[in-house]
Image (cartoon, grey):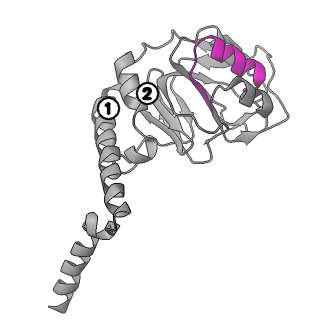
Amino acid sequence: MFVINEPPPQIAADMVALLRQAEPATIGHFRHVGFMDPDVRSLLSGHRIAGTAVTVRCAGLDTTIVHYALGRLRPGDVLVIDRAGDMRHAACGGGVAFAARAAGCVGIVIDGMATDIDELREYGLPVWARGLSTVTGKRLFLHGEFGTPVSCGGVAVTAGDAILADENGVLVMPPGDIKAAAERAIGMQQAEKVSLARIAKGERLPDINGTNARIAEILEQQKG
């Protein structure tokens, strides 16, 4: 059985650009939901992407729906693939990555396997996956879902969600959360640069961030 929905509305370009300035690990200082399992990791170094989630679910050998999705991707989309527990058959190789890049897709996130790592490096489309496999999926035309809610890396992903990903991991959030989360993270990143400059001049981090002062307070209270 196939379930086919329309692609989700895309997140506004200015919100995507704002989100891309934030590091997932910085948002991880204050946000506690939406982070995929760390086993879903970047296969290519040096990339940070942000975009609109376009979701598919395919089980076992049948990756027909991934090929269908390649015809529905738009510039700025991130293809998110729920493999329904399959950890043997690769859902993305060189051909899929090349076609996705040609459609303007900015990245692919797979809760499962990829393949053709040399081609992925050559084509430069960032891919996150649980690993690599020599066994590939096939177009069996048996089943698949496009544009439905899925699970990827232990996180519920709704078509149209925001995806932010780099080598540290993958974050999913509703589009409405982008502005507050990104602006807070960007502010923290700028503040860190100031702190690093102070450290470079000889100050100690626990003096700058208040750790020493707070521990001194606690020790004083313990005396009482």
In the rendered structure, which amino acid carries the disc numbered 2? Ala
The stretch of residues the image draws in magenta is 89-109
Q: Measuring 35% from the left and 23% from the top, which residue is drawn there?
A: 15
Q: Is residue 25 left or right of residue 219?
A: right
Q: What element carries label 2?
A: strand
Q: 10 Å neighbourhood of mark 2: few (<14), some, or many (≥20)?
A: many
Which of the two residues, 156 or 22, is positioned nearer the viewer here? 22
Q: Quadrant of the N terminus?
A: top right
Q: Is residue 158 above or below residue 193?
A: above
- Where residue 3 appears, as percent x and y from the top left, is 60, 14
Residue in the foreground of this view, choosing between 93 and 199: 199
Q: Estimate the spatial distance between the alpha carbons at disc 1 and disc 2, rounded to whole Å.
A: 9 Å
Q: Name the amino acid, label 1.
A: Asp
Residue at the bottom extreme of this rendering: 223
* Numbered disc 1: secondary structure: helix
- Write down the quadrant of residue 21 in the picture: top left
Q: Is residue 152 left or right of residue 130?
A: left
